[in-house]
Image: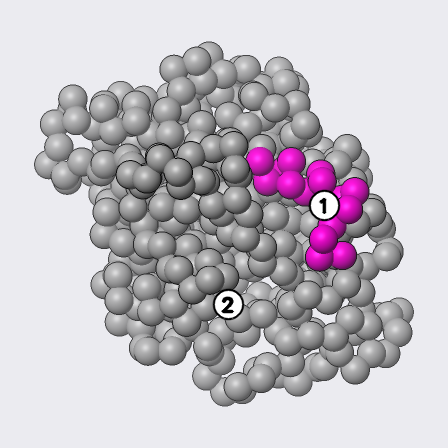
Amino acid sequence: MLHSNAARHALCLLASLSASALLAGCGDNEALPPHEGDPTCTGWGDEAPADGVLDLPRPTGPHPVGTQIRALTDSARGEEATEDPDDRRELMVQLWYPADPCGTGQLAPYLSPEEGDSRRTSGDLPLEDGFEARIHTHARVGVPLADDGAPHPVLLFSHGFGLLRADYTSLLEDLASHGFVVAAISHTYDTELTVFPDGRAVPFGSVVRTPAMDASPEEIEAFTQAMGEHVTVWVDDARFVLDELTAAAQDDPDGLLTGQLDLERVGVLGHSYGGAMAAEACARDDRFDAGLDIDGSLVGPKNGAGSRSIAQPFFILLASTHPDDATIDETYGAVAGQAYRAQVEGTAHLTFSDLPVVVEHFLGKDAAPDLLGTLDPARAVEITNAYTRAFVKAHVSGEAAPLLDGPSPDYPEVAFEKKP
């Protein structure tokens, strides 16, 4: 629907898997105005978007937001998705960060034209040509980081299998506005499209082969095992990106990150398969201080799900349609530190992305409720951002987060529990 057919099918499979069963179903815009107390700077206008343009939910934090996209190559790793043994693992990473309120630059596009074409032609939603240009973001390209709060805590984020990093812009901009530097990874060949600076556009082409909808239990089990093993590729991607950020904090060739990152405060989070990456990354690398899974079955290698022990605080945020899932129960039970689990009424697997907001704007209400949910899209963004923000503030930044104390009357849609 919203990505390649193979990826969509895999997403549906992952969204409905338990440990033993597959359940059926499946123009030049202006930026934010200055915040109160900021100097008045011409780089941050207050004009509203033009008619027909989708204004993404605005960040709620005290900082304006900057963004930068980087291409990274891990020369130590080959690329298993290609046949050339000399190919190295290449990634695109987008940074969102708290920006200097006097920085100037163009607003970032939501999607590149190539990504927009891919989204429009690879699915079954009747999106118009050029729809991506009518989505208004709130981050300016390449502006300096804010001095206020520096060095800033760091978050690494992974998209769902077959999705795009841009599908979570509302969440990532909001986290940046609250003082986090967020690095969102495009996992090449496992994302809908990866566009590199030299013009290459690499479509979805995962080494994990998705079984047919009428697959046998044995085929489903093999798929689940393959996805569990493949998580290690994404974990290695995240660890490599953290290595690169660590080097850039000391001496950034682009001049943006030098002295700006607090690598003693690092969190990892992701949606769907990205959530499985977050859990396995915490289990394998103690540089990550906390992890968060957004509606992902916590598949992992054989020494992972089922026996994965996580010492760091960990949060599991689930859709109301998430099936009984042994990987969730086992991982939650094995968290040695503070653990949280929340389930949101009226949500489906893709509710936690920007997609309900985008689809409602361009195609109206009630499109694909099985994947997008029935909760009002703006409310879904509010809930997703509030709980994610509270968790990383508490366990990455070390700030107070009363929302994590227990069920909240402000969010009656959320069934919340924690341990110990």
Residue at label 2? 110
Q: What residue do we see at 49% from left, 73% from top? A: 135
User: Residue 260: x, y in percent?
Assistant: 80, 49
Q: Earlier in the sequence, mark 1 or mark 2?
A: 2
Q: Amino acid at mark 2?
A: Tyr
Q: Amino acid at mark 1?
A: Ala
The answer to which of 163 and 316 lies nearer the viewer is 163
Label annotation for residue 248: 1
> Residue farthest to the front?
86
User: Residue 373: x, y in percent?
Assistant: 37, 53
Magenta-colored segment: predominant secondary structure: helix
Q: What residue do we see at 78% from left, 71% from top? A: 103
Magenta residues, as a range? 240-255
Instruction: Determine if residue 407 is in view.
Output: no
Q: Mark 2: which secondary structure?
A: loop
Label annotation for residue 398: none
